[in-house]
Image (tube, coloured by chain):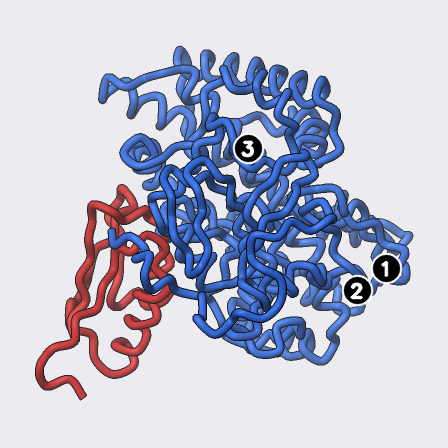
Chain colours: A blue, B red
Amino acid sequence: MTETASTTTPGISSTTTSGPASGEVTDAEFPLERGCPFSTPTEYEQIREHSPLAKVRLTTGREAWWIAGHELGRAVLADRRFSSDRRRDNFPFVSTDPETRKQLQDQPTSMIGMDGAEHAQARRALMGEFTVRRMAGLRPRIQQIVDQHIDEMLSSDQRTADLVEALSLPVPSLVICELLGVPYADHDFFQARSGPLIRHTTPTEVRLRIQKELNTYLGALIDRKVTDPTDDLLSRQIAKHHAAGTFDRTSLVSMAFLLLIAGHETTANMISLGVVGLLQHPDQLAMIKEDPEKTPPAVEELLRYFTIADTVTARVATEDVQLGDTTINAGDGVVISGLAADHDPTVFTDPDRLDLERGARHHVAFGFGPHQCIGQTLARMELQIVFDTLFRRIPTLRLAAPLDDIPFKSDAFVYGAERLPVAW
Amino acid sequence: MRIEADTDVCIGAGQCVLTDPTVFDQHDDGIVMLITKHPEGGAAHRAREAVELCPSGALSLIEEPGDS
């Protein structure tokens, strides 16, 4: 692994000296709301043009560096001098105030909060579950799940639906539940809890209570699978760790928690936003309706365009790091804004235009570096199947409300739509 | 050109396999496996893309004498 050389930092041009100094703190609290409803906040653009990083104040009251350039963002995410350890004092959370964080610090972290060898060990234990080959094996079942939900939509006489409830949430929810071996009968329980967890505005006591309830539930589930294993990811992980002598109930609960929340709240929001994006661009939608071969690149473009998990890619510097003219001090928090990176015009021409034929796959919608999303192949496949099937089976699908009236999740760190009224 | 894969840093993201399954595969544990170290033509082009996309830095590309 080559570390980022401090003398030639990628993504920083020595000529970008105009504008405010990179150390300047703006008045706004980051992350900022998207506009209209998808545009990148102007402040992100300003930071990128000037530096491309600046010190900002987060919604949690802390200061952190905000990185808004694609090349620099990728370099920092691949640089092991920046830690993912969420137990570090100055980790730049955007959703959890420092007080809450103290209460959560005693809890074990899942692999997203680990570094180096500890992370590699946790990730490697799980990687085999998400190979391209294994995911391809899930395709027929996912197709069946999507078809069943569209059957239900079509069986209604009303010819209208809230797509979030009818398709966007239940499909990935059912897929991740079956993969993990979590009874889908309990999905209301998770959905009611995963929703609030991804919001900045959820009060501390609610967040703590939810975390505890989910941990208790998953702990009991894992206990049942220890005595009565079934054919699913959790049972296989239990068996694998028992065989290796590394079984640890608490770690498995953390892992299950991560996969369950990630499985609920990411793909679901991408389905809703992707449908909006496609319906807003009927010429481009017509193209993928005619030729399903064009769906995979279209999915990449939708992932880039929306980059729904803008701030999950956050780190803490473990030593002083020189990025161009800027010194990041040991202990400084750094947020690599995926949204800003994926709308960097030096990398993506005319970045605010949705271009389903762009063919650019080097976006950071799934992150970058050693923590890049483990479920990305599954997510891609779910999105491809949903978009292909939905518009093939309901070709007259349209939004049943003006775009301005659709409630978007402006207070969530996974962007999405609260509801999506559609008609056909 | 030649492709090298560092299996110690691979994180099993699978981007290389999605880019060109005639050059890259995964072992059952998710770790990258090179089907060929010397892709040619279109496969060489896609292998370059895979190196660029690899999130962990596990893939590298070595230009060799005779490369055009």
Mark 2–mark 1 distance (CA, rounded to whole Å): 6 Å
Q: Is residue A384 visible?
A: no
> From the viewer's perspective, is residue A319 above or below residue A309?
above
Q: Earlier in the sequence, mark 2 or mark 1?
A: 2
Q: Mark 3 and mark 1: span between their CA atoms? A: 30 Å
- Specify the label residue A183 is tagged with: none
| SS of the residue under disc 2 | loop
Task: Give left or right: position of A225 versus A402.
Answer: left
Marks 3 & 1, CB-CB < 8 Å contact: no
**Do dots 2 and 1 share one subunit?**
yes
Residue at 64% across, 53% down: A270
Residue A260 tag number: 3
Q: Is residue A347 above or below residue A302?
A: below
* Residue mark closest to the camera, 3 vs 2: 3
Q: Which residue matches tag 1? A: A423
Please report, as a chain letter, where disc 2 is located: A
Q: Amino acid at mark 1?
A: Ala
Disc 3, SS: helix
Q: Position of residue A10 (x, y in %)?
A: 39, 64
